[in-house]
Amino acid sequence: MSHIDYIDGILSIDGVPLTSIAAAVGTPVYCYSSATLADGYRAYADAFARNGLPNALVCYALKANGNLAVVRSLAALGAGADVVSEGELRRALAAGVPADRIIFSGVGKTPAEMAFALDRGIMQLNVESVEELATLNEVAIGMDRRAPVALRVNPDVAADTHDKISTGRKHDKFGIDWNAAPAIYQQAAAMPGIEVVGIAVHIGSQITSLSPYRAAFARVVEMARSLREDGVAIRRIDFGGGLGITYRDEAPPRVADYVGVIAEAVRDLQCEVVVEPGRRIAGPAGVLLARVVRVKRTVDRTFIVLDAAMNDLVRPAMYDAWHPIVPVVAPEPDSPRETVDVVGPICESTDMFAAQRELPRLREGDLVAFGAAGAYGAAMSSEYNSRLLVPEVLACEAIWSVVRRRPTFDDMLSQDAIPDWVRAPFNG
């Protein structure tokens, strides 16, 4: 059952008409469905239980959508967290995720971030280089701690996804070279500040085939067995995330089938299992609500100019991403359609959401919604062109709340400071 659908001709989210939210909050605004978030998490948890892995930990990847209310909703269901910065770690803790259910990933952890994570007692740090391992060892010794570590290995598996979000090839910046990993594990096991607990892998994002997962997971499990034989205590495998969703016509695997691949890979291995989904949970749960500012007609094109822009949803500009765009008020079945460019007001030609998209005819003032926008939407938004950050709303069982307010222009300007030595404006 979809929780984002038309009710009495009005697109609604968890029973709340988007017209009501737009009237109260204004546009643009992100709106999230609590029910869809819960469905996304339970798809993993239930599949693991059916496959005999009820204790597998689903660590939601905050980089997809780190809103505190979103993270709290998932934490309440039992989700852990995958974080890639001290800020995300603080978000996870503030949202109520227990420290011992948090994994810290990323290639550029600073000593200060490492110390913060160790001080809070998180579950695991995923180390991505021998240089990072040496730094973490020093930090842990200085704190009289042992850092729980999994080395993120690079299996050199192409994920058949967008080049900018593929992370498991040997020339990508992520992970430790496959052939070098066994020797580095031996180094790690001998370091006084390091406790080797597992092995981690992550091959990319928006993956729509199980084949690269099968290849990568088989290699990782093989390495785990080999390391155990060599005396390295591997008790946990972090299989990462990256499972894709449908934006246009993609047919990504079912979560149950993805979990089945993991279950088959770890059969008889007797290890803890962790996964780090982000997009698959948050993506389908959100829409970006915008209003038509102007319909501009030229000799060659018709432009639908929205009050949302690439600073609000950068994926089309950055990745040539495709998002469904639908009118909030359902058109009549025989309503005319036209081919248009859907654009924002920013002074860049890249500020385009859709080129030559056939849509129902839109007029100034109409509301439209971008589908599958719950992941990497608000999380990647900015104040480019001095536009205010987009607010966020969470809906649940026909009620809704603002979970990130729209700043005022005074809020935005207050972040800057003019030194006394900067000359006063010229006044003639």
Image: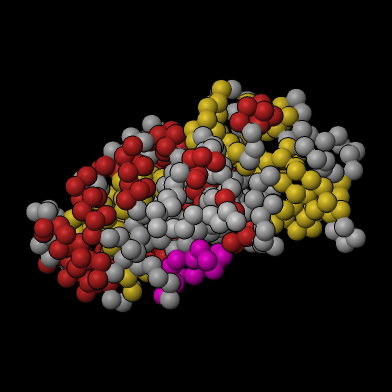
Q: Where is residue 111? Give x, y as percent.
A: 23, 60
Q: In the figure, is residue 426 to the left or right of 49?
A: right
**Residue 394 at what x, y percent from top left?**
53, 32
Q: Residue furthest top?
A: 398
Observer able to see residue 128: yes
x 47%, y 62%: residue: 204
At x 67%, y 61%, the residue is 348
Question: Colour mode?
Answer: secondary structure
Percent position (x, y) of residue 4? 64, 34
Q: Quadrant of the C terminus?
A: bottom right
Q: Position of residue 30 (x, y in %)?
A: 58, 39
Which picture quadrant has residue 326? top right
In reply to whether residue 164 is colored magenta, the answer given is yes
Horizontal side of 228 relative to 284 (left or right) equals left
Looking at the image, how many numbered discs can be counted on the residues? 0
Residue 173, quarter of the rendered image: bottom left
Is residue 32 at least partly visible in the picture?
no
The reply to whether the magenta stretch includes residue 140 is no
Q: Residue furthest front?
A: 428
- Name the residue: 53% across, 59% down: 207
- Give the extent of the magenta segment: 155-170
Q: Quadrant of the N terminus?
A: top right
Q: Nearer the viewer, residue 327 or 293?
A: 293
Secondary structure mainly formed by the magenta segment: loop
Q: Is residue 143 left or right of residue 275?
A: left
Residue at image position (64%, 33%) is 26
Q: Nearer the viewer, residue 383 or 94?
A: 383
